[in-house]
Image (tube, rainbow, N blue to C red):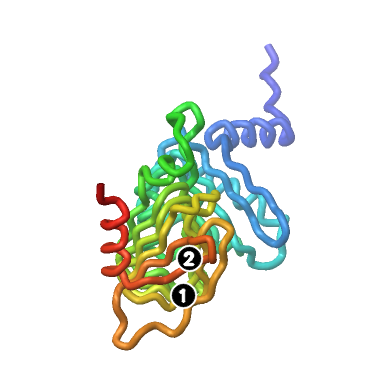
Amino acid sequence: MSEAEPPSLEESVTESNEVESAEIPINGLVLEHCEGRCRFTLPADLDWIDLWPQLQVYLRGQEHLWSETLPVDCVCGQRLLDQSQLQQLAEVLNEHQLRLDKIITERRQTAIAAATLGYSVQQRELPPLLVKEADSEANSAANPLYLKTTLRSGMEIRHEASVVIVGDVNAGASIIAAGDIIVWGRLRGVAHAGAKGNLGARIMTLEMAATQLRIADFVARTPDPPKPPYPEVAYATQQGIQIAPADAWARSLAVSKAP
């Protein structure tokens, strides 16, 4: 009886490749290019320990598509990422000429971790089926984003409700919120409250020195801050954006609501 012929080299290579791709499937990872930026979407239903090797393999297969370092917007959705995972992600992107720049997330914990590391943050609305019907003003007052950090130049925070910053907002940084903006520190960047048209939104800070203030569609530049500085509130009126000392504004608000 003749011995069975050994498989050809071509057959061996094919089988080997099939085994390798079966061991590390690429599922749910999407990298898109648009106007000098990349948008990188991570799957929400895969544990980090399983996602990590797939992510590295995927990037090795994509790196031929660009020749210069590009900024990356990372879409995390409902995936929860801590600071160490974000740092890992930034490092592997950097190895492939990609620079992590913005985190787009639906999880507040991920937004806080990203802002603490110095990345721009956009916190999206919850999926429509989870959002209760409400008018825009009530909706903007719910679920505020609280960050204990200083926003450096180039950072951008976007949120579908109010934003509270315990720290400074440096020139070149920006906050865009559908609700109020409260800065427990110096506000020297751009602040856009009521970004979805809520004229009742306010901007409050310990030192008002913003390069630009916006409330809904109103835009204003701030005058030089008082010396010594004191807390101030910016709010919309028929004449545009007005700035008042916080104590005077609080007294006038109390009087207007008195029976």
SS at mark 1 in the image:
loop
| Callout 1 crowding tier (Cα within 10 Å): few <14, some 14–19, many ≥20 | many
State the residue at coordinates (58%, 49%): 40
Of callouts 1 and 2, the N-terminal one: 2
Identify whether 39 is placed above or below 222.
above
Q: Which mark is residue 210?
A: 1
Q: Residue furthest front?
A: 259
Identify whether 126 is placed above or below 196.
above
**Mark 1: amino acid:** Ala
Percent coordinates x, y for residue 209 in the rendering: 43, 78
Q: Which mark is residue 67?
A: none
Query: Are the residues at dot 1 and dot 2 in contact (C-beta closer than 8 Å)?
Result: yes
**Mark 2: amino acid:** Ala
Q: Residue 19's image quarter?
A: top right
Percent coordinates x, y for residue 67 in the rendering: 71, 65
State the residue at coordinates (36%, 84%): 226
**Left or right of 235: which side holds 14?**
right
State the residue at coordinates (29%, 86%): 228
**Pointer 2: what residue?**
191
Residue closer to the observer: 23 or 179: 179
Percent coordinates x, y for residue 256 in the rendering: 32, 55
Percent coordinates x, y for residue 221 in the rendering: 53, 75
| Callout 2 crowding tier (Cα within 10 Å): few <14, some 14–19, many ≥20 | many
**Quadrant showing the N terminus:** top right
The reply to whether residue 120 is visible in this rendering is: no
